Image (cartoon, helix red, strand yellow):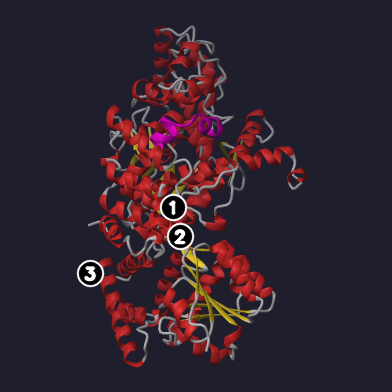
Amino acid sequence: MKNRLISAPQRIKEHRMRRITTTRFDISGAEVPRVAKHALISRFAKYEDFSGGPGFRNLLFAFMAHYGGGLLVWLFSRFENRSARWMAVLRRHFSGR
Amino acid sequence: MPSMEFTTFHTLEKLLDAADKAAASCDTISLDIFDTVLIRRIHNPDMIKPAVARFIARLAVLYGKKGWSWEKVQALRDEKEAAQRAETAKKFVDHEARYPDFMTAVLNEVFHDQMTPAVLEKVTGYELALESAMIVPRAGFADWIRTLFKMGKNVFLISDIYLPSTHLKRLIQNVGLIDAITEVISSADSFLAKASGEAFPMIQKRYALDVHRWMHIGDNPISDGLRPVQFGIKAFVLNDKREKRRKTVARMYTVFSNQSLFWKGRALHQLMLPLEAENSPRDPLYVDGYTFLAPLVGVFIQSILERARRGDIGRIYFLSREGWTFKKFWEKAVPFLAPEGGGPDVRYLYVSRLALAGPSCAVQGIPQTKADIAFQPPGNRDMRDFCRVFGLDMDPLMPLMRRYGLSPEDALSPLHQGWSQNNRFKFVYLVEDRDFQEEVRRQTRPAHQALMRYLEMEGFFEHRDVILVDVGWTGTIQRFLFDAIRHRSDKPRLHGYLFAAGRGIPYPSTDENHITGVLYDKDRFDFAASTILNVRDFFEEAFRAPHPGLKGYRVTETGQVLEFRNENDGAERAETAQNAHYHPLQQGILDGAPRFAAAAAVTGFCAEEIKPWIRYLLVSRIAFPKTREIQRIRHKHHLDDFYGKHPVPKRFLKQQKRLWDESLASLRFNPWIRLKYYLFKERIR
């Protein structure tokens, strides 16, 4: 009923609309898998090293934060007491030491 | 005996459902401000402090105070804040500090006798501007607060923070909630905080509130849960998992940026992202402008700003028409990137290759290199095109052309049929002819006179050094401009900064006149950034001003007038259609400007540090774009005022074919086409 009040071109336009920040808190059009793809291609094609590049470990963590983040946050919250040791490991990594 | 338990919610929606029901039996609703009603793009609020320290250090330099690095200012701030907290702890339970107090102490030490309330206001204004740029109201809370206030409830926003309520009100005003609340209460005013629970009795006494009809909402289980409950207030605590995840992502990129250069730009880009209600669905072109072009222009503008900071630059001229977008971006970025002021002022200069080509010959004539520029666009073929480009009347030149056997129809560009080496010789002899040069000078003198009047009106000769900002690519506009003014003793030194410098024609660089490509310069090897040159027309269209192109300068009795293209001719109508198509793209660029600048100020990254991420953006969006991205972003019309109307041979067009000119079918179904173009066909020229 609601859609009938909107004209067809308007509906098409709204369908094409995009958000800048994706639901995974990533950048629309520059998502982590796209970064990973270019890091991988450039490793073999040697067209650009992006000043050292993103690095495998950081890419993996970025992928986990964006794509597995919801699950990880839920798990750590659900088992907060038991996950203390794992949290310490992660904190050590994210502290930049 | 009231219940000693508070309720915890893991999503905002569930909390709002429960709070809405509970609000029916309450007259007063108090909410914690930070991490509840307002969230920050940054994961750590202390990230604002180094940016403010950098500002104070730059301000100190302007005031002639030496030896104040930003690290030293930051250490002093920490020391003064800690001292005040220790002092407060002697009289109060909470160890609170008050921003105006400790910041005055810091500034007194830095500025001594030059310290005035105006200096404190400048620093406070900048800190609050950065805070404002980093905070976002949670959409659900903002709507709910407005509804409650309309229902006649008391709505208090409370925070344990060093900013007094007057400062907090400025932040609340910026997010549009100041008219929907009863009062803002800060622990910095009374040194009674939520953390100890002392704030609640104080508020109850001051506003004569009924604790049994009072509900408090916040994110801290102690300050916002246990303490209000102990005082008999109903409390809801928000432990939002999704928000925690967002902050984890922001934190992760900040940590990555300390480990590797590549992630610096990505971390900055993360802080630019819109959140909550800001992140509404947008036209895809707007998204491209915001996520792709805004960081590119941001780095370009930041580089120019860093150059201008060296102190010798008197003024910055943004050259029409692409300079229009750059200037708008500059104006939105400078309050964050250079708030201390004292830098060069900026102006927009109406110029074009076509308008400057003629005046540039009025004193020096036309040297051969410049004459050949007329035949660079493949659509230019003969003397008619040459005369059109330099604004010459061909009839007085005909006897001179006949002297060397050159007719108006003779092809002078090797791309066109009929060209011969002999024609080239005739043309070279003609250009070397003194009478020809004299006739050129005579014809171009009025336009030159008009240009000089225009430049004087714009104060072009008032400074010793000026920066000229343009999109690129060979620096022809600057070359012509310098030729037009080189005879004057008061001419400024021209420092040209181009978005990208392709240097198709070698530029005659001297100390007085040089160009530098910021994102790409052919003089520096940069494979990834060279992709800009493959889509020059796209960048020109994306940055172009909405006004018509400049045709020339004309002398009048009272001064001079600028002559623009007729808005009703076919080419201009096509441009108007293109402008309408790219409007969301340009809006995205300009909306991204303050966010880029605020993020750059907070992270403190210089332009060079952001470039690896910019290179990635260029490679992924220009060399390896998705088919739908090309389909969407490819420009529809492009007008080159230098370009003639002669049909270009097919073999030449085939050679010039770029990835973005390929059919959508090829782009969609040929898996190697992007790699083939990038590695073999579009290598650095």
Closest to the observer, B163 or B661: B163
Residue type for callout 2: Lys
Pointers 2 and 1 within a single chain? no
Residue B48 belongs to magenta span:
no
Q: CA distance from mark 3 to mark 2?
A: 45 Å
Closest to the observer, B252 or B26: B26
Q: Is residue B668 above or below residue B84?
A: above
Q: CA distance from mark 1 to mark 3?
A: 48 Å
Q: Residues within 10 Å of mark 2 (few under 14, many from 20)?
A: some
Residue B624 belongs to magenta span:
yes
The label on residue B458 is none
**Dots 2, 1 in contact, CB < 8 A:** yes
Q: Position of residue B191 (x, y in %)?
A: 41, 86
The residue range painted magenta reads: B618-633
Q: Position of residue B314 (x, y in %)?
A: 39, 55
Kindly identify which residue carries mark 3: B67
Which chain does the residue under circle 1 lie in? A
Q: Position of residue B574 (x, y in %)?
A: 64, 31
Q: Is residue B83 visible?
A: yes
Q: Is residue B499 visible?
A: no
Query: Which image quarter holds the C terminus of chain B?
Result: top left
Is label 1 in a helix, a strand or a loop? helix
Q: Residues within 10 Å of mark 1 (few under 14, many from 20)?
A: some
Kindly identify which residue carries mark 2: B241
Kindly identify which residue carries mark 1: A70
Residue type for callout 3: Gly
Side (left or right) of B683 relative to B67: right
Residue type for callout 1: Gly
